[in-house]
Amino acid sequence: MSYCFECPVMCGADRENGEVGVCCAGGCSFVARAARHYYEEPPISGTRGSGAIFFTGCNMRCVFCQNHEISRGLPEDTASARPVDAESLCDTMLRLQELGAHNINLVTPTPHVRLIERALPLAKARGLVIPIVCNTNGYERVETLKRLEGLIDIYLPDLKYVSPRLAERYSGRSDYFEFAGPAIKEMHRQVGCLELDGEGMAKRGLIVRHLVLPCAVDETRRVLDFIKAELPLETCISLMSQYTPIPGMKRPLDRRLTKAEYRRAKEYAVSLGFTNVFVQELSSAEKEFTPEFDGYFE
Ligand code: SF4
């Protein structure tokens, strides 16, 4: 049976026979960029960069998506996108390792899990030894994640919202937290808290990302409350301030985060007792941190 039920959308697209799913992925997977990326968290990017492989398509529709060029629309219409199969994906991963990337960073991989399940064992058999990162929006089915157990070393999920109202308003998915909460617990079950090697690079574990949004520090508090209630206090959290409005955004998303909003978010994380929190400078909200999707394959 070829119907796709990989993610919580459960749209059942017959992708193997060419039907395109809600995520805009069809029978063939496409990659828009495969290159070393220097703007992830320090233990992911290090000095030599993270070997980021940006797949096209996405199962969410965040109004503020910085990767909208590749996350929406058919891959055939994305000028930079190249089709990949298990062999070529394997070659790409080995090439990034040869170039010195600290890890392989699979960005928005969920619609492509079947391909990844085939490509990773192939690449490992051919000498891929650097850690594999699953970089996801968090909107995942636990059943799908279980298939990745043993293949993924580091989970880097977003936890965007707890409230159905905000999840619907900004991402069109009122059930986001219903899935993201259990998914993040499953990721932690598989890989545990973040472990670093002797050079301070991530070798295994979970980093939960949360983007603080304008006028939504209360939502950040709900997210942090969930992490405190369900995961160990040493869970690594990346509290991001890099929200950048895209042209035409409506209030309150038409501006960047204020210093006061970000300070309140950080203070709340500290007050809950988290010991492992990455914070950003507000200057991180710059265009240069968003990769150009120009078909660049290193
Ligand atoms: S991964 Fe895409 S095609 Fe598959 S269920 Fe989700 S939205 Fe549908």
Image (tube, helix red, strand yellow):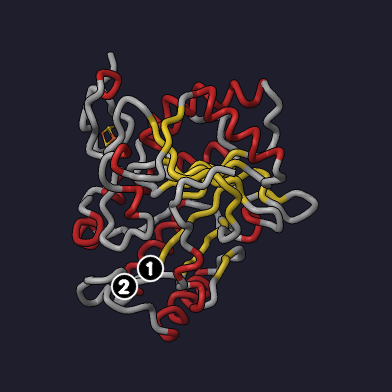
Q: Quadrant of residue 217 in the image?
A: bottom left
Residue most extreme to the right: 198
**Farthest residue toward the bottom?**
260
**Relative to 244, 134 lies left or right:** right
Comparing 228 with 1, the one in front is 1
Quadrant for the N terminus in the image: top left
Horizontal and vertical percent position of residue 102: 68, 47
Q: Please tell me which residue is depicted at 65% across the width and 33% down the height of the picture.
A: 94
Ligand 1 - quadrant of the structure image: top left
Q: Amino acid at mark 2?
A: Ala
Q: What label sits on residue 216 in the rendered view?
A: 2
The three-letter amino acid code for the residue at tag 1 is Thr
Question: Residues at badges 1 and 2 in contact (C-beta under 8 Å)?
Answer: yes
Tell me the SS state at disc 2. loop
> Residue 39: x, y in percent?
56, 61
> In the rendered image, which residue does mark 1 sit on?
220
Crowding at label 2, few (<14), some or many (≥20) Cα neighbours within 10 Å? some
Whether the residue under disc 2 has CB within 8 Å of ligand 1: no
**Which residue sits furthest top?**
1
